[in-house]
Amino acid sequence: MKYDVVVVGAGPAGAIAARCSAKHDANTLIIEEHPYIGSPVQCTGIISIKALDECDLKPESSFVYRNIRGANIYSPGNHCIKIDGGKTKAHVIDRKIFDRILVAKALDEGADLILRTKATALKNNKNGAVLTVRQNGTLQEIQTKVVIGADGIQSSVARMSGLGRVGKILSCIQVEGQYEMADADFVEIFLGNNVAPGFFAWVVPAADSIARIGLCVNSSNSANRSAHQYLKKLLKEHSIVSTRYHGSSTSMVVGGMPVGALKHTCTDAVIIVGDAAGQIKPTSGGGIYTCAVCAKIAGGVASIGDASKKGLELYDTMWRKCIGKELTIGMHIHNTIGNFSDQRLDEFINIFDDQNIMDAVRQYGDMDQPSVLLGKIAPYLNKKQLFTFAGSIIKDFINSK
Ligand SMILES: Cc1cc2nc3c(=O)[nH]c(=O)nc-3n(C[C@H](O)[C@H](O)[C@H](O)COP(=O)(O)OP(=O)(O)OC[C@H]3O[C@@H](n4cnc5c(N)ncnc54)[C@H](O)[C@@H]3O)c2cc1C
């Protein structure tokens, strides 16, 4: 088999990259190790309006469960701040259908798809690559100019091409079950070192009376307890969640969130994109917006046909120009807030009990670009708050150098 571009992985990053490469007349193949697209699902399915736009999709009822206006954020001491966007800011989607629509769009542009086919070996040089795949127990070789590794958190393409692995992986778990939302247009976020050390827990309304309840933990902050143990505790003991959760879950998702992008995302004949490259927002764990931005660039650059590392570096340069700063600042915010004590987290949430700050949040809050908000609220912080919060972020920045 011979193709101009072979995309490994039919998740959102792979589907969007393949769509763009095929659109630019490159003969494109997607391979997916599973027999189905979009399954198993490892996602809460929150997608901003901007992200949906970036995927070139409209919010259709075939995959949108409901609209979300904002968030109720609970501090460790259960002080709640309501962030109300005033209108729909995001959607809760069915990821399985969403992924299938994205792949169908790539096929409409002329890409080919082979399911139950796993990339197992790779030989690459500046003129192209030979990818070995296993299909129904048989190995075969595919010749191509460029391989796009969109193969998620365990990326074998990144490993086989020497680009390595994302350094920090958060452990995540989520169940879907009966839950009485206080307000079905809002998601609930819970902070605290006893709730989800290093990150946060969430409750996201899905279908009627059903919510997705989950959390991520940073294993270096988690006192030897697993994400599963924290979730059990949240559902059974948390003073708010345990009273709203009705004790029966219909599905469970266990996964990882790779935060902190790879140092290099391309080499001779190889581009890495999406979770495989760590292109996920470290503040929220959202990866669909960022992977859509990067996958479009990946598909476009791969279709040019210059397989040399020098040629493909255009991809690395362009995606970092679009979202690199946001991911870097997001990582400093993630490191800083992730290491706060419960007392600091309470103080942090109290900052938002201020009309000027809430106005700024309403006007400039953007779940895909939280750094913009940082600059807008800074003028309203008093000296102590500036020293504590902005100072900690700057300290993390200096320590990372
Ligand atoms: C618990 C949880 C909740 C989340 N919630 C949200 C959310 O609400 N909103 C949001 O924006 N993001 C969310 N994310 C992140 C989001 O799910 C990912 O960022 C997104 O799926 C990344 O897409 P991707 O295409 O890079 O990788 P994936 O979706 O992981 O797709 C990779 C594909 O590659 C295939 N593959 C892997 N290896 C091979 C191989 N060797 N050969 C062939 N195929 C292979 C896999 O089967 C898979 O289909 C969440 C993540 C987790 C863990």
Image: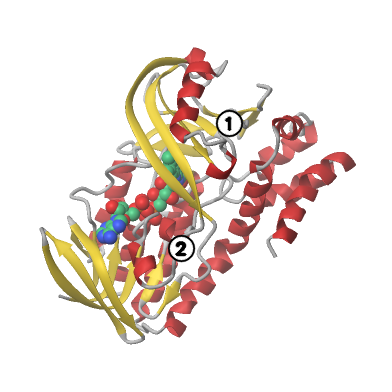
Question: What is the three-letter code of the residue carrying label 2?
Answer: Cys
Q: Is residue 365 above or below residue 292?
A: above
Asked whether the viewer can see residue 382, the reply is: no
Q: Residues within 10 Å of mark 2 (few under 14, many from 20)?
A: many
Mark sitting on residue 294: 2
The residue under the point 17% across, 63% down is 134
State which quarter of the image contains the N terminus: bottom left
The residue under the point 32% across, 45% down is 98
State which quarter of the image contains the C terminus: bottom right
Residue carrying label 1: 71
Could you tell me if the residues under marks 1 and 2 are in contact, i.e. CB atoms within 8 Å?
no
SS at mark 2 in the image: helix
Mark 1 vs mark 2, CA separation in Å:
27 Å
How far across and down, in percent of the image, does residue 279 sit? 49, 58
Q: Earlier in the sequence, mark 1 or mark 2?
A: 1
The residue under the point 32% across, 80% down is 124
